Amino acid sequence: MRFVIIGAGRVGLRTARVLRDEGHEVTLVERDEPRVQRARNEAFTVVEGDGSREHFLEEAGIAEADALGALTGDLNVNFTACMIAKHYGCRTVMRIDEAYREEIYRKYADEVDEVIYPERLGAIGAKNALLGGTIRAIADIEQHLQVVELTITDAAPVNGYTISELELPADSRVLAFGKHDGELELPGEDESLEVGDRVVVLADFEVLSDIRQLLVGESASQAVANAGSGSGGVN
């Protein structure tokens, strides 16, 4: 596939490396000369210029590209680049860097194919590392919703239950289930919950602590602290 990446900073260049390593064709657009040189030193094709200007995007091959990633630290540049790319039929991914607010996401989410917040994605990884092996945050869906993967422990109250017997809080649902030695699949009602099994749940932050108590067996105080007590995001 062919990709145009706007911005050769930390996020843009790392993304370009991953795409190239997977065999894709990548062209970067960057206006900062030292960043341009650094990317060229890594043998990337770089168009030196403003990614929000159509003629620079045309020079980068936007007409033939499958997707554009607008990954600079400038929201206006990113949004403009995505709107131009949409005109050429590209999939568009836009980075936002401001303090995460739901209204920012909602403002742009309908205009581009995907909005990403790199600092938030990095925070999810950091939180997973801190929490250890039984609980793993997968994604923030909205400001108040999160997808989490939890591993059943011998202390879990639901240990030995079947999926049909599992009663989660109202603002949550099971998305997938996997035995400790198997892959995640759609949950079957007769599947039994045993130590080491994994359950993927979509839940409101307000009920995450309750879910952790059920599936992992944390105490109420531990569950509240680890779930962020409905703090609205990954800490």
Image (spheres, rainbow, N blue to C red):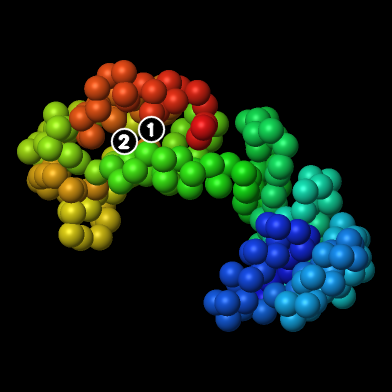
Which of 235 and 72 lies nearest the eye of the viewer? 235
Identify which amino acid the numbered label 1 is placed on. Answer: Ala
Tell me where residue 7 appears, x and y as whole percent: 78, 60
- Please report contact status of discs 2 and 1: CB closer than 8 Å, yes or no: yes
- Say which residue appears at 69% left-offset and 33% top-offset: 99
Residue 86 visible in the current orientation: no
Against 170, is 136 above or below?
A: below
Identify which amino acid the numbered label 2 is placed on. Answer: Arg
Q: Secondary structure at mark 2?
A: strand
Which residue bears the numbered disc 2? 173
Q: Earlier in the sequence, mark 2 or mark 1?
A: 2
Against 132, is 104 above or below?
A: above
- Where residue 227 sits, quadrant-wise, is top left
Tell me where residue 214 appears, x and y as whole percent: 22, 29
Q: Nearer the viewer, mark 2 or mark 1?
A: 1
- Where residue 209 sits, quadrant-wise, is top left
In space, the residues marked 2 and 1 are separated at their CA atoms by: 7 Å
Quadrant position of the N terminus in the picture: bottom right
Which of 35 and 87 lies nearest the eye of the viewer? 35
- In the drawing, what numbered circle is on residue 203? 1
